[in-house]
Structures are given as structure tokens and as C-alpha cells.
Image (cartoon, rainbow, N blue to C red):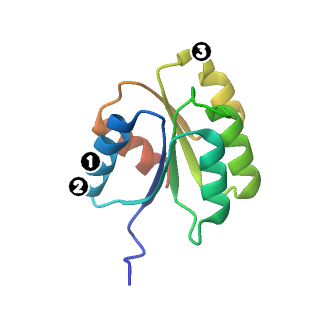
Amino acid sequence: MQDKTVISVAIVDDEADLTRLLIMLLKKRGMDVSFVAHDGQEAVDMFKNAHKKPDVILMDHHMKTIDGIEATKRILDISKDTSVIFLSADNHVKEDALRVGACSFLNKPASINEIISAINHCKT
């Protein structure tokens, strides 16, 4: 049985090296990685089908099929209980990300401490 205090995080990013690094760092910090999606549509589909929705989603902006803004809108239409943290080099989309419901926006590259701080902030 999983500890209820463990924060579950989904990662949505098309950079495989970054997703591997995030998985390793989040697990070292005691978090559970719910799923990894490599594009916005895959994220929406995985979120819809997830038995237990992640507490937090780390969302990139530029991806195939649909971008992070549209994926965030669709995911939050399904459930407002999940927090979305944008993690993107595209600072010009910060206002749009926050407008559609993202809890936080971090510029890439962000340190693991910045990511953990945003996760903790969004879950309190």
C-alpha cells in the first residue's frame, strides 16, 4: 500500500534525456512518477485513463500534436484537482499558461530545488 503523503508527479516533455533525469531526481526526493508523456495529446489520453490522477504535472510547451497550453486546458477540464507546473524555455507563453490554470511557471533550465519548491507550493 502506497503512503498517502507521497506526491505523485506526471512528466510531459518530448526531451527523453530530460524526462529520464526528472524521473531519477523526483524519485530520489521521495516522489512517485505517475506517467511520462512525450506530447500533449498523449498526456491528455494518459491522464483520462489514469486510475489515480497525479497530484502534479510538469508540462512543457512545444510538443507534437497539441502544445502544453492546450493539453493543460484539456487536463484541467477533466479534473481541477491536479496542479500543472509549466517547465518551459518559452517564457513568452507564461501569461497564457497561468491564464489557463497552471499553478506555476518555471523557466528551463530549472534546478531540482526550484521544481521541488514549485511542487510543494502548488500542493499546499
Instruction: Find residue 63 and report its horizontal and vertical position in percent.
Output: 57, 30
* Badge 3 amino acid: His
Give the side of residue 76 with respect to residue 33, left or right.
Answer: right
- Looking at the image, the residue that sits furthest to the right is 77
Q: Is residue 114 left or right of residue 86?
A: left
Of labels 3 and 2, earlier in sequence is 2
Q: Residue 36 at x, y = what percent?
A: 47, 50
Judged from the image, the secondary structure of the residue bearing numbered disc 2 is helix
Is the N terminus in the top left, top right, bottom left or bottom right quadrant?
A: bottom left
Q: Residue 12 in the image: state x and y as whole percent.
A: 51, 43
SS at mark 3 in the image: helix
Label 1 sits on a secondary structure element that is helix
Going by the numbered disc 2, the residue's amino acid type is Lys
Classify mark 1: residues with Cα within 10 Å, few (<14), some (14-19) or many (20+): some
Where in the figure is residue 47, as x and y percent of width and height?
A: 62, 57
Residue 120: numbered disc? none
Residue to which mark 2 is pinned:
28
Where is mark 3, residue-wise?
92
Q: Which circle's residue, 1 or 3, is located before the other in the chain?
A: 1
Tell me: 37 left or right of 110.
right
Query: Label 2: few (<14), some or many (≥20) within 10 Å?
Result: few
Q: Which residue occupies 23% across, 55% down?
A: 28
Dot 3 surroundings within 10 Å: few (below 14), some, or many (20 or more)? few
Q: Nearer the viewer, residue 42 or 95?
A: 42
- Residue plotted at (40% across, 24% down): 108
Asked if the residue at tag 2 contacts the one at tag 3, i.e. Cβ–Cβ closer than 8 Å, the answer is no
Q: As displayed, is residue 38 above or below residue 67?
A: below
Residue type, label 1: Leu
Give the Cα distance between marks 3 and 2. Answer: 32 Å
- What is the spatial separation of the Cα atoms under label 1 and label 3, in whole angstroms? 27 Å
Q: Which mark is residue 25?
A: 1
Q: Are marks 1 and 2 in contact (CB under 8 Å)?
A: yes
